[in-house]
């Protein structure tokens, strides 16, 4: 397990999203309520929790979900109105010369 960890804190309206990442490990994200001083006080415990989880399982297992390809669209059949306009012959133009 890698000893280094990166901590990212996003503050907004009295809440913080704390993300902790380490190379080769899935990130751990926590929501902490409070101002920056309170959040910073909880960061060492959150890092320790993340490192303990990574010691057991650094990454979540891959899923084996197989997604079937989409079915082709149904064949279009021309409507009677559109086929009538396609089969109608244009009127003869008068000869000018």
Image (spheres, grey):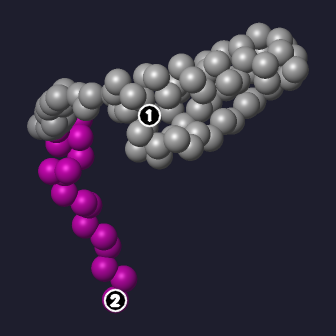
User: In the displayed image of the protein, which residue is found farthest to the bottom?
Assistant: 97
Which one is in front, 16 or 59?
59
- Judged from the image, the secondary structure of the residue bearing numbered disc 1 is loop
- Which residue matches tag 2? 97
Residue 77 vertical position relative to residue 44 in the rendered view, above or below? below
Residue 2: where, in percent of width, then height?
47, 43
Q: Is residue 59 magenta?
A: no
User: In the displayed image of the protein, which residue is found farthest to the top?
Assistant: 33
Identify the image quadrant of residue 14.
top right
- Which residue matches tag 1? 26
Q: Is residue 33 visible?
A: yes
- Residue at screen point 27% across, 28% down: 61
Residue 8: where, in percent of width, then height?
68, 36
Q: Quadrant of the N terminus?
A: top left
- Residue at screen point 36% across, 32% down: 59
Identify the image quadrant of residue 39.
top right
- Residue at screen point 70% across, 24% down: 43
Q: Verify CB contact (< 8 Å) between mark 2 and mark 1.
A: no
Residues rendered magenta in the picture? 77-97
**Crowding near the residue tagged with mark 2, few <14, some 14–19, many ≥20 C-alpha atoms within 10 Å:** few
Q: Quadrant of the C terminus?
A: bottom left
Which one is in front, 7 or 84?
7
């Amino acid at each position: 397990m890698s000893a280094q960890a990166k901590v990212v804190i996003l503050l907004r309206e009295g809440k913080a999203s704390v993300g902790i990442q380490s190379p080769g490990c899935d990130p751990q994200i926590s929501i902490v309520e409070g101002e920056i001083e309170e959040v910073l006080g909880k960061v060492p415990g959150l890092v320790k929790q993340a490192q303990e989880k990574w010691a057991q399982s650094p990454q979540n297992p891959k899923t084996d979900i197989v997604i079937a390809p989409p079915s082709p669209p149904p064949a279009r059949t021309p409507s009677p109105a559109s086929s009538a306009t396609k089969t109608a012959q244009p009127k003869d133009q008068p000869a000018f010369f």
